Image (spheres, grey):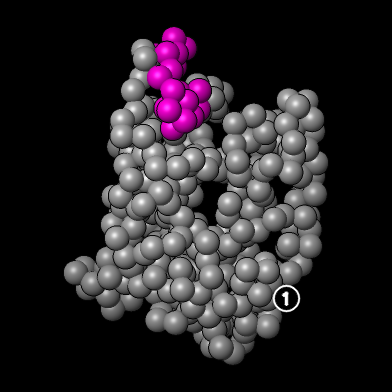
Amino acid sequence: MTLLGYQIPNFTYPDIAPEDLFPTVTAQAVEAEAAGFDTVLVMDHFYQLPILGEPDEPMIECYTLLSALAQHTSRVRLSALVTGNTYRNPTLLAKTVTALDVVSGGRAQLGIGAGWFELEHDALGFEFGTFTDRFEKLEEALQIILPMLRGERPTVDGRRYRVTDAINSPAPLGRIPVMIGGGGERKTLRMVAQYADESNLICGRDEIGRKLDALAGHCEALGRDRSEITVSLQTTACVAPTHEEAVREFEAYLQRNPRAQVRSASTIVGSPDEVAARYAELLAAGVDGVTVNAPANGHVPGRVTLLGETLSAVVGR
């Protein structure tokens, strides 16, 4: 379960040559593992998101990257946050996640969502469809993927997908946890209650209680024990040894990325004590854990270590 996850959302770092890009990413994963993070996650996108930069900034395909990071880590779970269901046939995704589990020694996690980045779909030729289309696809996909991950051979003749006696061999080394990302109270959280082990919310602190109530309601309607589901909150942070250093590093990031929409209002910026206090407030709102990214300074040696050590104390790891 993800109580403290480190997400790597960007691959645009100042003064980093192309040949040093993967080592810079690897260093963050290695620091995260040593500092107490239980999961390392990367985005499943092919274009950079508007909130972080320009579409043509570097984006490494997530499952190739996760499989490579598996060779440099030994303990952390490895996951997309989250896989866009629209990008892969569900049988291919089941095989891909299983391959990650095999090459990582049983550390794969399936993070999945309906998909939402319309520009990426249109530019690269992925069918986008309507909101309803994407959620219907996600639900049918889960009815194929989950049995394949659990050693079954599903046959599904659905509106969106058709498979017959779908075989997944080799099987995963263990039970692959499933995280569904998003905070939609009617559709997403109902699917969490029905299919998932974990929920990753994207919402403000003042919305957490309502989201948790909605999830509990879906669990009750489906006869699911709410305590079986781990709920984490997606966050962004910039921590440094002092408040002044953190502010300086965050402002430098904004100068490098003038169109990025990540701002101090949605980013926790400060010294370890300040950051710990803010995260304690989030956890007090009722979530079990957090996922955190650090686009401003995660590439700076030692910053992921500082972030992990700071937050480990807060989440009790």
Residue positioned most to the left:
19
Q: Quadrant of residue 122?
A: top left
Q: Write the residue at 23% across / 72% down.
A: 20
175 vs 310: above or below:
above
Magenta-tinted stretch: 141-162
Q: Secondary structure at mark 1?
A: helix
Mark 1, residues whose alpha carbon is within 10 Å: few (<14), some, or many (≥20)? some
User: Which percent across, then down, holds residue 31?
Assistant: 43, 74
**Residue 191 drawn in magenta:** no
User: Which percent across, then down, holds residue 152?
Assistant: 44, 23
Is residue 57 shown left or right of residue 142? Answer: left
Q: Write the residue at 19% across / 69% down.
A: 19
User: Which percent across, then down, holds residue 157?
Assistant: 44, 9
Q: Nearer the viewer, residue 26 or 270?
A: 26
Q: Quadrant of residue 217?
A: top right
What amino acid type is highlighted by mark number 1?
Ala
Q: Would you name the residue on which mark 1 appears?
A: 277
